[in-house]
Image: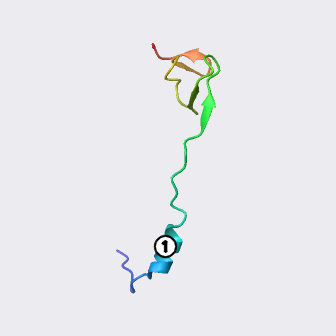
Amino acid sequence: MAVPKRKMSRSNTRHRRSNWKAVTPNLVTCDSCRQPKLAHIACPTCGTYNRRQVLEV
């Protein structure tokens, strides 16, 4: 297993970790009920996905 030969400095560590950002989820509007929902997920409000009823709500 690979092991680092030297300790990584704070500036290098922080520079590498600078792109670890929490991103907000992309919300889209549901086609049938117009409520915000996650993309590629069945709507929790009306239970439709791709204009088909897939969940009983």
Q: Quadrant of residue 24?
A: top right
Q: Which residue is drawn at the image coordinates 53% and 67% (left, top)?
A: 18
Q: Which residue is mark 1?
A: 14
Q: Is residue 22 left or right of residue 31?
A: left
Q: Residues within 10 Å of mark 1 (few under 14, many from 20)?
A: few
Q: Is residue 5 left or right of residue 15?
A: left
Q: Quadrant of the N terminus?
A: bottom left
Q: Is residue 1 left or right of residue 53?
A: left
Q: Which residue is drawn at the image coordinates 51% and 20% (left, top)?
A: 45
The colouring scheme, among rainbow, by chain, secondary structure or one colour, is rainbow
- Residue 10 % position (x, y): 44, 79
Q: Quadrant of the C terminus?
A: top left
- Residue 53 % position (x, y): 54, 14
Q: Quadrant of residue 39?
A: top right
Position above or below: 32 against 20: above
Q: Who is closer to the viewer here, 53 or 12?
A: 12
Q: Which residue is drawn at the image coordinates 49% and 79% (left, top)?
A: 11
- Residue 12 % position (x, y): 50, 78
Q: Is residue 28 left or right of residue 15?
A: right
